[in-house]
Image (cartoon, rainbow, N blue to C red):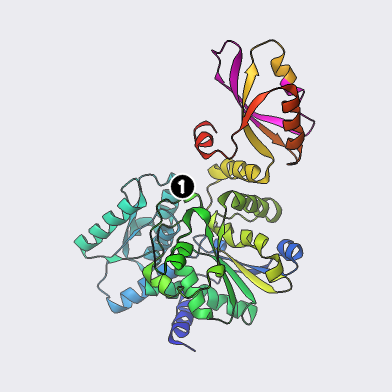
Amino acid sequence: MTEFQNNARQAEAAMRAVFEPTPLQRNDHLSDRYGAEILLKREDLSPVRSYKLRGAFNAMRKALAARSEITQFVCASAGNHAQGVAFMCRHFGVKGVIFMPVTTPQQKIGKTEKFGGDAVSIRLTGDYFDDTLQAAQAYCTKVGGHFLSPFDDEDVIEGQASVAVEIEAQLGGMPDHLILPVGGGGLSAGVRSYMGDSVNLTLIEPAGGACLAAALAAGEPVRLRHVDNFADGAAVAQIGKRTFARLADLDPAQARVIDEDRLCTTMLEMLNIEGIVLEPAGALAVDALKDMGDVIQGKTVVCVTSGGNFDFERLPEVKERAQRYSGVKKYFILRMPQRPGALRDFLEILGPEDDIARFEYLKKSARNFGSVLIGIETMRPENFVHILRKLDDAGFDYRDITRDEVLAEFLI
């Protein structure tokens, strides 16, 4: 047994005084679909609905053991890390100051306050996370506090490795294949360091934050120029230096990238069929199964569902993105003739499985034609073949803007 494995087991054992192991559950729906033994490691069922309290616990436990005079911990986070730190501040009876961007949703602020109670204070600073992080680090230096990194810290990495310790104990050994999300790399670095090469490992990133893939290509951590924060639990601009050091020798094929719109289809599927609420990052490992049928068939596969902190106010957006990805919803700019009966002619093109989800005049002042933004939902993607053919036959001038990022951002 390596020193890291021993430390990870000690961290996992110490956690039992705070919370129970998260379940490792066989999922019949996914197992039947992929012809494999699919088990979900339900980190979304932890006390803070993510694995982040593991790293926070271990880093705070070891810091307090080394410096008993520490009275204040400081972190910067807009989500799961903040909640994990808040929970552990109350557990250890220490003060925590948590910096969050001004743009943080009130739901996340409220949950952080609930978990921390009187032990934590929250400071809203900066519109973007980098500004928040700088403010937190400057404050920490000023007051002599202890800064808690969300991922790029050896004690955090060691704490996140407790996920692997539990999987091994619950399964009675190692799985054939392990799939887990990667953001800053704390979870993936810890799990890989514990399991070594005994398990086939696949790490999944959102397309809008593929910092591991960029680092593997460059041979070192690099900062992404743009990050899509939809999968905010894994959308990181730059992987940590310490975490990448533990992942640098990965085969690039082990790091896969998932489209955020496709991810929405998995979130809805798990909610509607299984009753499992997953945040976007928490659904990454499950969504990856769609690309791995031949690789995992007949194998024992563990997917880590890393978080379930999902604000249901985002559900309409998730449904919208899933429908567009699945091809059952499209948006068009249609030139509508300004004459009696033109709208009726258009409506007659639609079939019994088609519905108008949006209808908005963009330009009414034209004398002969008016521009209309129209959204159409249907039950099957192939129905659009018939709709478009009928539009062409009727002589309607239209433009499909469903995948036009610029127009969709302003109009949809």
**Which quadrant of the view contains residue 35?**
bottom right
SS at mark 1 in the image: helix
Towards the viewer: 375 or 30:
375
Q: Residue at x 68, y 74 (%)?
A: 300
Could you tell me residue 237's position as x and y percent?
A: 41, 57
Query: Looking at the figure, which quarter contains the C terminus?
Result: top right
Towards the viewer: 140 or 186:
186
Q: Is residue 321 above or below residue 334?
A: below
Towards the viewer: 107 or 262:
262
**Which residue is situated farthest in the bottom direction here?**
1
Q: Is residue 28 above or below residue 312?
A: below
Would you call the spot at circle 1 few (<14 residues within 10 Å), some (14-19), or many (20 or more)?
Answer: some
Residue hosting label 1: 107
Q: Is residue 406 above or below residue 232?
A: above
Q: How many marks?
A: 1
Q: Is residue 183 visible?
A: no
Could you tell me residue 331's position as x and y percent?
A: 62, 33
Could you tell me residue 401's position as x and y percent?
A: 59, 34
Q: Is residue 191 visible?
A: yes
Residue 30 belongs to the span the image colors magenta: no
Q: Residue at x 74, y 22 (%)?
A: 394
Q: Residue at x 33, y 60 (%)?
A: 75
Q: Amino acid at mark 1?
A: Gln
Could you tell me residue 60's position as x and y percent?
A: 36, 71
Q: Residue at x 48, y 63 (%)?
A: 213
**Which residue is situated farthest in the left direction here?**
142
Q: Which residues are magenta?
A: 346-375
**Which quadrant of the view contains residue 356?**
top right
**Which residue is situated farthest in the right direction here?**
352
Q: Is residue 297 left or right of residue 59?
A: right
Q: Is residue 217 left or right of residue 402?
A: left
Q: Is residue 255 above or below residue 67?
A: above
